[in-house]
Structures are given as C-alpha cells and as structure tokens.
Image (tube, grey):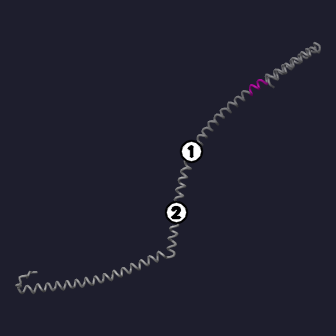
Amino acid sequence: MKTREIIILLLAAAFGAVAIVTWNGEIEAKERADKIAKEAEAARVQAAAAAAKAAQDYASLKKAADEASKQAAAALAKAKADAAQTVADLAKAKEDAAKAAVKTAELEKAKADAAARVNELTAELGRLRDGSELKDALAKQKKAEADLEAASTALREANAKLAAALARIAELEEENRRLREQTKGTPNTSPNYRVL
C-alpha cells in the first residue's frame, strides 16, 4: 500500500471513531475506539512495512537504473566506436571500389586487345587454310630458284670467260717470256728499243 492510502485509511478510521462515539454509547465507543486503534496500529505497522518495502524496492530500482545507465553508456560508447569503424570501412570500401573500377577498365582494355588479336589470328588462320600465303611463298621460292639458276648460269659463263682470260694471260705471259729470251740473244740497234 502507498503512504497516501494509509493516511487516508487512518483519517477514515479516525472519522469513523468520532462517528461511533457520537452514535453509540460511551462503552461501545471505547470498544469501537480500541478496535479502531488496533486497526490503526495494524494499518500503521502495515504502512511501515509497505514503506520499508517501497524503500527497498526504490533502492533496487535505483540500482537497476544505475546499472542500466552504465550499460547504456557502454552501449553508446560501443555504438560510437562501431560508427567510427563503419565510417573507416566505408572509406576503405570506396577506395577499393575506385581501385576495382580502374582494374575493370584495364581488364576491359586487355579483353578488347585480346579480341583484336583473336580476330587477327582467325584471319591469318583463314589465309593459311585457303593456302594463299603458301601459294605466294611457293611462287616466291620458284622465282628465287629461277633467279638462282640464272645467276648460276651467269656465274658459269663468267667463270668460262675468266678461264679463257686466264688462259690468254698465260699465253701472253709465255709469249712475253719467249720474246724476252729472243731479244737477249740479238742486240737491238733501234733507237726506240727499251729493255723489258
């Protein structure tokens, strides 16, 4: 019971006692007053017990409130730390996203380059399959062989001419030697004569 209710009950009991004294006789009034006094004492004891319980409940509630306040402060501090960590994580995520965008652009360029190279290789493979490059290479080889044959023929002719020229030089040297030996035996009286 609350203190206010207890006080109201005591006042009601007091007014009831006055009314009883007035309406009943003195003995009845005393008996009634004793009874009311006992009830009032019981109510006072009950009120004291209720007040003690209320004080105890208040102390436990205050302790619980203090504990809840401490927990709330700890939770608030943790929430602030988590918020700071979240901001840091968000900044790192933005930085990672920017790096990923650059890497994606690089990969897209590499993909485009690879696709272009695949197209080139496909075209080259097509040319190889239809044999046009091989035909060109064979034609060039035949032309080179014909040029080589012509060069070989020209070289043989040049060698033949060189051999003929060397033979003619040998003949001339032999003729020159012979003429020198002839002139050694007979003196030349010509004014234009020069010794070789």
The one nearer the camera, 83 or 42, is 83
Q: Which residues are magenta?
A: 50-57
Tags 1 and 2 touching, CB below 8 Å: no
- Where is residue 78 drawn, in percent x and y? 62, 38
What's the residue at 40%, 79% (across, down)?
Answer: 143
- Which is the main secondary structure of the residues drawn in magenta? helix
Q: Which residue is mark 2?
A: 114
Q: Is residue 3 above or below residue 184?
A: above
Q: Give, as a three-letter code, the residue at label 2.
A: Ala
Q: Quick one: quadrant of the N terminus?
A: top right
Alpha-carbon neighbours of circle 2 within 10 Å: few (<14), some, or many (≥20)?
few
Q: Is residue 154 magenta?
A: no
54 drawn magenta: yes
Which residue: 52% across, 59% down? 110
Asked whether 14 or 89 is in front, the reply is: 89
Q: Relative to residue 82, is residue 106 drawn left or right?
A: left
Give the x, y percent position of residue 113: 51, 61
Numbered circles on residues, count: 2
How far across and down, in percent of the image, does residue 109 sit? 52, 58
Q: Is residue 16 left or right of residue 158?
A: right
Residue 91 — which label?
Answer: 1
Residue 138's disc is: none
Q: From mark 1 to mark 2, how far is it between C-alphas?
A: 34 Å
Q: Front-most of 32 and 10? A: 10
Vertical arrangement, residue 144 with respect to residue 74, above or below = below
Mark with earlier residue (1, 2): 1
The part of the image, by quadrant, that contains residue 55 is top right
Instruction: Using the rendered view, name the quadrant where residue 141 is placed.
Output: bottom left
Find numbered disc 1 in the image and state the secondary structure of the residue it sits on. Answer: helix
